Image (cartoon, rainbow, N blue to C red):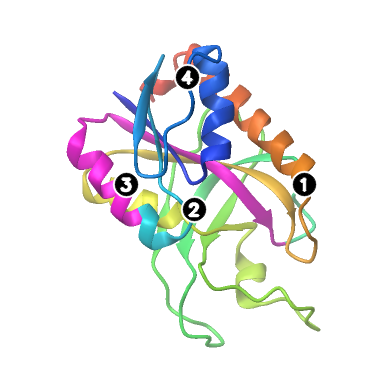
Amino acid sequence: MLGLVFSTRASAQSFVDQSANGRFDAPEVGEYVKVDGGLVVVTGPGKIHATLRTERFLQQHDLDLVIHAGRAVALGEEVEPGTLVGASFVLEGDRVALHDPTYPRMPLERLPGLSHEGTLVSQDHTDDAPAEEKSYWERIADMRDDTGYAVAYVAAQHGVPCRIVKGITHRASETPDTARKDDVNEKLATQLRETLTSGAKDV
């Protein structure tokens, strides 16, 4: 069985709307619903919520694959807002600020059907104030969220493969607008539906 893990109810709602033709709403945070193709769960923001709720999700259900989908922030100029990016590497980024810190890292296989891939760093604590030079994470990662590493880590502990797809809402130096967030949610939902209907849920 496939598990689709979303960090926000808004992102999940777009997918549920497309999958269930408006028959029901996305689950509340911490709950799940069954749609054609798998189970949908919403973790809520932050790595602690993502860890605890993904753990419970995997304990309750025998899953063959976890796909984590949601929004992310671009850390450089290479990825345009509105782009869907498959994470080929995910890093845990809340570490003591050092010149070359050590940090947990995890390689991932990219979800089929995506034309862009990149490195994702997950951070609960960020500072997007203008700086004269790029931060450590901006030099080694392409995008940032606050849940991806936690979901991938828990899945790995259960021996379940994980794929991550993120929709870029804005760059770190910008402020996102609601229309862009909504557009990214719809793009994520469409991509996931295409992936599942093509049979890629078995990868």
Q: Which mark is first along the chain, 3 or 4?
A: 4
Q: How far across and how far down the image is residue 186, in percent?
A: 66, 29
What span is in magenta?
51-75
As drawn, is 183 to the left or to the right of 61? right
Residue type, label 2:
Phe
Within 10 angstroms of label 1, few (less than 14), some, or many (20 or more) residues? some
The numbered disc on residue 81 is 1
Q: CA gap, disc 4 to disc 2?
A: 34 Å
Q: CA gap, disc 4 to disc 1?
A: 30 Å
Q: Which mark is nearer the camera, 2 or 1?
A: 1
The numbered disc on residue 24 is 4
Q: Which mark is first along the chain, 2 or 4?
A: 4
Instruction: Identify whether 46 is placed above or below 169.
Output: below
- Quickly name the residue at label 2: 89
Q: Which mark is nearer the camera, 4 or 1?
A: 4
Screen quadrant of the N terminus: top left
Q: CA gap, disc 1 to disc 3?
A: 27 Å
Q: Which mark is first along the chain, 3 or 1?
A: 3
Q: How far across and how far down the image is residue 85, in percent?
A: 63, 42
- Quickly name the residue at label 3: 54
Residue drawn at (54%, 19%) of the image: 193
Instruction: Identify whether 99 is placed above or below 22.
Output: below
Residue drawn at (37%, 26%) of the image: 33
Residue type, label 4:
Phe
Q: Which mark is first along the chain, 1 or 4?
A: 4
Q: Which mark is nearer the camera, 2 or 3?
A: 3
In this view of the protein, which residue sits in the foreground, 130 or 161? 130
Instruction: Identify whether 149 is placed above or below 137.
Output: above
Screen quadrant of the C terminus: top left
User: Secondary structure under badge 3?
Assistant: helix
Within 10 angstroms of label 2, few (less than 14), some, or many (20 or more) residues? many
